Image: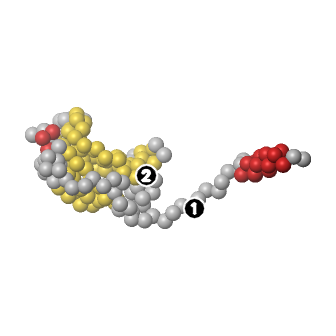
Amino acid sequence: MPLRALVVLSFAAVLAACSSDKPQPAAAPKAPVASKPAKELGPLPAYQRELSGTLLNIPVGAEVELALLVIDERGRPQGLLASSTLSGNGLDLPFRLRFNPEAFPAGARVELRGRASKSGQLILHLPPLRIAQAQTQATGPLRFEKAP
């Protein structure tokens, strides 16, 4: 057998051996570790304000959405001032939500609302938290409730 044919045949055998139809075993879930915020925002610019706090007991793999909303007299959202999406890690989850204070409507009701979903299903929601002033504030720890 010529050397070239032997090399090609050996190469084909190695490629066939490397490919596998068997599914790879699932990796064992990692223990939760304290995480840094998903993206560092840097220092707060002079033209922005910020809500910050900690979300308690967010399950691993849950997607958390926070929104600062303008609410009408019937309790319906009328405008979005800021929003953020975070991933749950099983531990307390710090958040920072920046907004423009000039967009904060005078005399209107503004609320921080949140929801957590896992695999596309709503699992938790944050009771609405009223934000009275357009200034930098710490909300402290916030606890989500089970969704109905």
Q: Amino acid at mark 1?
A: Ala
Dot 2: element: loop
Q: Is residue 101 above or below residue 96?
A: above
In the rendered structure, the answer to whether residue 20 lies left or right of residue 110 reads: right
Q: Is residue 49 visible from the viewing direction of this image?
A: no
Residue 110: x percent and y percent? 18, 43
Packing grade of label 2 (10 A; few <14, some 14-19, many >=20) is: many
The structure residue drawn at horizontal position 51% and vertical position 63%, both measured from the top left corner, is 30
The structure residue drawn at horizontal position 45% and vertical position 48%, both measured from the top left corner, is 118
In the rendered structure, the answer to whether residue 57 lies left or right of residue 81 reads: right
Cβ atoms under marks 1 and 2 closer than 8 Å:
no
**Pointer 1 residue:** 28
- Number of labelled discs? 2
Dot 1: element: loop
Q: Quadrant of residue 88?
A: bottom left
State the residue lying farthest toward the left.
Answer: 106
Residue 123: x percent and y percent? 42, 49
Packing grade of label 1 (10 A; few <14, some 14-19, many >=20) is: few
In the rendered structure, the answer to whether residue 134 lies left or right of residue 57 reads: left
User: Spatial distance from mark 1 to mark 2, Cα to Cα?
Assistant: 18 Å
The structure residue drawn at horizontal position 75% and vertical position 51%, both measured from the top left corner, is 14
Q: Is residue 21 visible from the viewing direction of this image?
A: yes
**Pointer 2 residue:** 62
Q: Nearer the viewer, mark 1 or mark 2?
A: 1
The structure residue drawn at horizontal position 22% and vertical position 40%, both measured from the top left corner, is 81
Q: Nearer the viewer, residue 9 or 112?
A: 9
